[in-house]
Amino acid sequence: MDIEINLLKKEILQCSKCHLAASRNHVIFGEGNTNAQIFIIGEAPGRDEDLQGRPFVGKSGQLLDKILDACGFTRNEHVFISNIVKCRPPDNRIPTPQEAATCMPWLLKQIDLINPKILILLGATALKYMAGADRKITRERGNWLSLQNRLAMPVYHPAALLRDPSLKRDTWEDFKKIVFKYRDLVNPEHYSAHV
C-alpha cells in the first residue's frame, strides 16, 4: 500500500492541472500515518504551509496539534492530514469550485488508499466539498455524517477558534465524541488524560 501512496504522491507533487500550480512554492500532499484510522481534511494550504511544504504548520496547525494532543492523538501514529486543494490559493482565499473539483480526485484517492474509519472535516469549506454545498458548519458540527462509507465529524476550523475563542468549548465537545468513537471502532484502550 505504501508503494501506491508513494506513486500517488509523486503524481500529485507534479500536478499542474489548475492555475494554482503557477503561484505555489510547494504542493502539500499531506502528512501523517498512511495507515491512520483518522483522516483530517482541511481547506487549503496557507502561507506557512506553502513555504514549508507541510500541512497545518502555522498558528492553526499549532492549535490543531494541541487539540490532537489533548485527545491522545499524534500526527505520526493516529492521523493523516490533507486538504481539499493541495496548493495555496492567492492571499489565502477560499478555493473556487473549479479548483476544488480539479483537486478532489487526489483527496478521494488518498482517502481510498489510507482507508480510515473516521474523517474529520475542518470547517465550512471541507464540509461543503465533502458533503454538499447546502451544508452549514454551524448546523452540522458535532454530528456524525456518513461520507465515503465512513463516519465523518464536521468541526470548526482551528482558524475560526483563533478568531473567536468562544467556539473552543463546542470544538472540544466535538473532539471528545471523536475520541469515544475511536475507542469504539479502533482501540478501546486508547488513552487521553482529558477524555
Image (cartoon, rainbow, N blue to C red):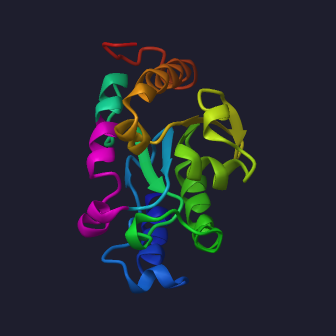
Which residue reaches farthest left? 52
- Position of residue 79 measured from the top left corner of the image (x, y, whole percent): 41, 41
Q: Looking at the image, which is closer to me, 114 or 108?
A: 108
Would residue 6 appear left or right of 66 to someone viewing this image? Answer: right
- Residue occupying image coordinates x 53% and y 44%: 123
Would residue 27 appear left or right of 101 to someone viewing this image? Answer: left
Does the magenta-highlighted stretch encompass residue 190? no
Judge whether 76 appears above or below 100 on screen: above
- Position of residue 78 measured from the top left corner of the image (x, y, whole percent): 40, 36
Which quadrant of the view contains residue 63?
A: top left
Which quadrant of the view contains residue 92?
A: bottom left
Quadrant where the C terminus lies? top left
Does the magenta-highlighted stretch encompass residue 56? yes
Q: Looking at the image, which is closer to me, 115 or 61?
A: 61
Would residue 38 appear left or right of 63 to someone viewing this image? Answer: right
Judge whether 101 appears above or below 171 on screen: below
- Residue occupying image coordinates x 43% and y 69%: 9
- Position of residue 36 measured from the top left corner of the image (x, y, whole percent): 45, 41
Report the magenta stretch's main SS: helix
Q: Give the range drawn in magenta.
A: 46-65
User: In the rendered image, is residue 77 in sight?
Assistant: no
Figure label count: 0
User: In the rendered image, is residue 121 in sight?
Assistant: yes
- Residue occupying image coordinates x 30% and y 60%: 54
- Position of residue 25 measured from the top left corner of the image (x, y, whole percent): 30, 77
Judge whether 11 appears above or below 73 on screen: below
- Residue occupying image coordinates x 27% and y 47%: 59
